[in-house]
């Protein structure tokens, strides 16, 4: 009898684990399929992960938010670690940029038809005098690429960001943003050319 209960418990546990993994995969796929697509300008940081292979570590224009754009932060107030909502709007060059932000999990006003709210995380708290910025992590700071290609892409990004090739457009990342503000990387872009696209599953 106890062996039968043990087998049932093992089956229930296995089904729960499979269900949880399926839920995570389906949630990511839903964002990629149904999320609002935005293009973010990027700069590289570091190209290698020993466990998973080559990747391009990315920093965005929206990774640093000016204090003046944070609507609910009083002058001189300490910004604590936690969620931050960053409102993005498409610029004339096609990239989406931050127009305002709110500390906490919700914006004070709904986003317009040509805007999107993206949720990030402030990892540190600072006393923020005028002119300073806060760092925001969105969970989209790494993009894995085929083996041996990360370093070449990173070097090309650095070259373009330095202004060495002003005639070439910057690299960008297409991001799908869900209604709850979470984002998933859809593709790595070189100007108008898609270099790598994330599969749904």
Image: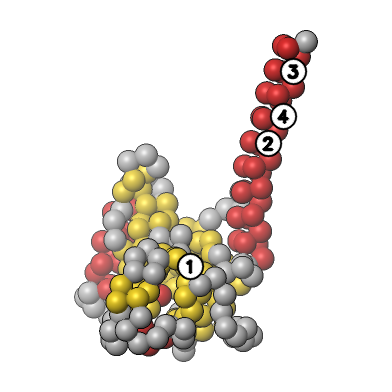
How far is mark 4 from mark 3, CA to CA? 10 Å
Marks 4 and 2 close (CB-CB < 8 Å): yes
Dot 2 or dot 3: first in sequence order is 3
- Residue found 35% across the figure and 76% down from its top: 78
Residues under numbered marks 2 and 3 in contact, where contact means CB atoms less than 8 Å apart? no
Q: Residues within 10 Å of mark 3 (few under 14, many from 20)?
A: few
Name the residue that disc number 2 marks. 16
The residue indicated by pointer 1 is 83
The answer to whether one can see residue 42 in this image is no
- Disc 2 crowd rating (10 Å Cα; few below 14, some 14-19, many 20+) is few
Q: Residue at x 64, y 70 (%)?
A: 179
Q: Which residue in the protein does label 3 denote?
A: 5
For the residue labelled by badge 3, is the local secondary structure a helix, a strand or a loop? helix
Secondary structure under tag 4 reads helix
Would residue 73 be seen by someone viewing this image from the given angle? yes
- Residue 20, labelled with which disc? none
Q: Quadrant of the N terminus?
A: top right
Marked residue nearer the N-terminal end (2 or 1)? 2
Q: Helix or strand or loop: what does disc 2 sit on? A: helix
């Amino acid at each position: 009898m106890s062996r039968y209960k043990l087998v049932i418990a093992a089956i229930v546990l296995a089904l729960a684990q499979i269900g949880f993994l399926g839920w995570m995969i389906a949630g990511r796929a839903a964002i990629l399929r149904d999320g609002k697509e935005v293009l973010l300008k990027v700069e590289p940081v570091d190209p290698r992960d020993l466990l998973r292979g080559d990747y391009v570590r990315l920093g965005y224009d929206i990774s640093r938010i000016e204090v003046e754009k944070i609507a609910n932060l009083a002058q001189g107030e300490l910004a604590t670690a936690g969620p931050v909502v960053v409102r993005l709007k498409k610029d004339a060059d096609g990239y989406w940029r931050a127009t305002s932000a709110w500390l906490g999990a919700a914006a004070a006003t709904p986003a317009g038809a040509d805007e999107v709210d993206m949720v990030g995380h402030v990892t540190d708290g600072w006393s923020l005098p005028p002119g300073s910025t806060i760092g925001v992590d969105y969970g989209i700071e790494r993009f894995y690429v085929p083996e041996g290609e990360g370093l070449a892409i990173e070097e090309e990004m650095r070259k373009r960001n330095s202004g060495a090739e002003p005639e070439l457009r910057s690299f960008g990342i297409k991001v799908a943003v869900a209604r709850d503000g979470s984002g998933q990387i859809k593709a790595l872009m070189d100007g108008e050319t898609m270099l790598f696209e994330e599969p749904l599953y």
